Image (cartoon, helix red, strand yellow):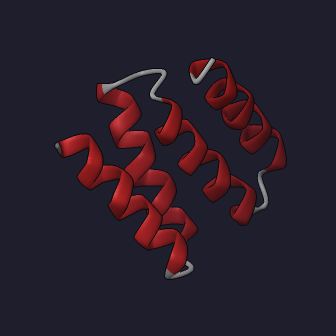
Amino acid sequence: MLESIALNTSLAHLHAGDAKAAEAEASALLGDAPGHGKALFRRGVARLKKGDAAAAAADLRDALDAER
């Protein structure tokens, strides 16, 4: 359940335009659940919105791999 709360909080930050907070929330979840596909996706989107295309691409590739 805590994973869902973290994912929803990250998404809410993205919708509010706070990519830094969205990235932090997703990163915190990844600290507890490395390789979590949705958390990697959320962090990738946040990093893309922050302008960090290289880190975003790495997270999004890892998210795709995690969901296979």
- Taking the spot 52% from the left edge, 31% from the top edge, the residue there is 37
- 47 versus 58 height, above or below: below
- 60 versus 20 height, above or below: above
- x, y (%) of residue 3? 27, 41
| Rendered-image quadrant of the N terminus | top left
Q: Is residue 1 left or right of residue 11?
A: left
Q: Is residue 32 left or right of residue 10?
A: left
Q: Nearer the viewer, residue 23 or 9?
A: 9
Q: Is residue 29 left or right of residue 53?
A: left
- Taking the spot 70% from the left edge, 63% from the top edge, the residue there is 50
| Rendered-image quadrant of the C terminus | top right
- Taking the spot 49% from the left edge, 82% from the top edge, the residue there is 16
- x, y (%) of residue 12? 42, 71
- x, y (%) of residue 17? 57, 79
Which quadrant would residue 60 be assigned to in this image?
Answer: top right
Q: Is residue 12 left or right of residue 43?
A: left
